[in-house]
Image (tube, rainbow, N blue to C red):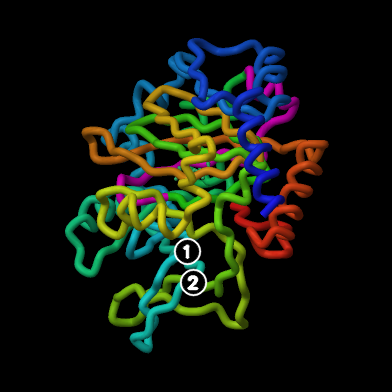
Amino acid sequence: MAMLGALKRLSWELHELDLGHEVERIQGPPTPANFLREYVSANKPCIFTGCVESWHATNKWSRDYLLDKCGDTAVTIDVTSNGRGDAVTIAEMEDGNTLECFAQPWQEKMSFGEFVSYLESSRESTPPIVPYLQKQNNNLLEEFPQLRGDIEDAGPHWAMEAFGAPPDAVNLWVGDERSVTSFHKDHYENIYVVIAGTKTFTLLPPSSVYRLHLGTYPAASYTRVPKGDLVVQLEEPPRTVVWSPVELPSSEPGSPSAATAANRWPLFFAEDLPGPMRCEVRAGEVLYLPSLWHHHVTQTANDEGWVVAVNFWYDMKFDAKYAYLKLVEDLAAQAGLGPSTMQGCSDG
Ligand SMILES: O=C(O)CCC(=O)C(=O)O
């Protein structure tokens, strides 16, 4: 496995020479030039504190305020039975058999007020139901225009200036600790602002793609059958999706133990490799998540029982780093560490 040795060396050198082992936390907004030079050009994540304090969102977005302003607003909600939409899932199919597939969430339309009640009432539901407001299609500006004035609607001014153009999408995320976002990467520069609660990001740089145990899975979707239950059905016509099955150990129901996880995904948990970069982004903090970084996200609710975040997706540059990443993907595939055609894999 000479190739694996070379990829491991690349991981170590990248962390030792450039990234370090922890996501930096910087107090106050950076200048656009500093942000561009130190983080965007370097493709390096960072948390910025104390730079969205003037947003109404950080001061006013209590449950009562949002219900008052948006209670009747029509929204689209993702629903699953395990809090893992767009994830590799071992699903019980309608015929009673189980199948490991890539399952996409069921989508339901309702008012924001109904969603808030549903988030609460679903905690008691049997069989389990987990709703997550996370439609990533510019939902904040399109579905909640009344909230536009509560944020900088093109993102923090220093980020927008550094990227040189307004964001392609501004998204609102509302959920609780039952929802987990599985490892994937995006072809976007991401400015992720937590408004309420805490998000925990586990990050792997693009060149660590070989640690994700990517596999090819049949595509499936949750569907609500007439008697009301959620079932997983394979897509017709059949399609496959390349995705990472890696899950992080936790005490939450359905999560693997540390020993099981290390056994199933040895390259991810390898002790002779730098640990993934894990960071908590708290209310009022901003994560710069560089394009193409693999990320897995869990959340911890605040005392109102939810987690609220806003993110801004800016166009990424398809430059040398993209070309190098493709090379690493090809090398990993040749070493049997991923599907042979890696184009577009695990893309959110
Ligand atoms: O907050 C989440 O659940 C996921 C966020 C994410 O994946 C993203 O912003 O790309």
Side of 292 where 287 appears, left or right:
left
Residue 194, quarter of picture: top left
Q: Residue furthest front?
A: 2
Q: Element under label 1?
A: strand
In front: 164, or 258? 258
Q: Report if residue 170 lies within the magenta region.
A: yes
Q: Which residue lies under the disc numbered 1?
A: 88
- Residue 1 position within the rendered picture, expressed as x and y whole percent measured from the top left: 67, 55
Pointer 1: residues within 10 angstroms few (<14), some, or many (20+)? Answer: many
- Residue 267 position within the rendered picture, expressed as x and y whole percent measured from the top left: 52, 50
Contact? badges 1 and 2 (CB < 8 Å): yes
- What residue range appears in magenta? 158-180
Q: Report if residue 108 lies within the magenta region.
A: no
* For residue 74, above or below residue 82: above
Residue 71, quarter of picture: top left
Residue at (28% x, 81% y) in the render:
227
Type of residue at label 1?
Val
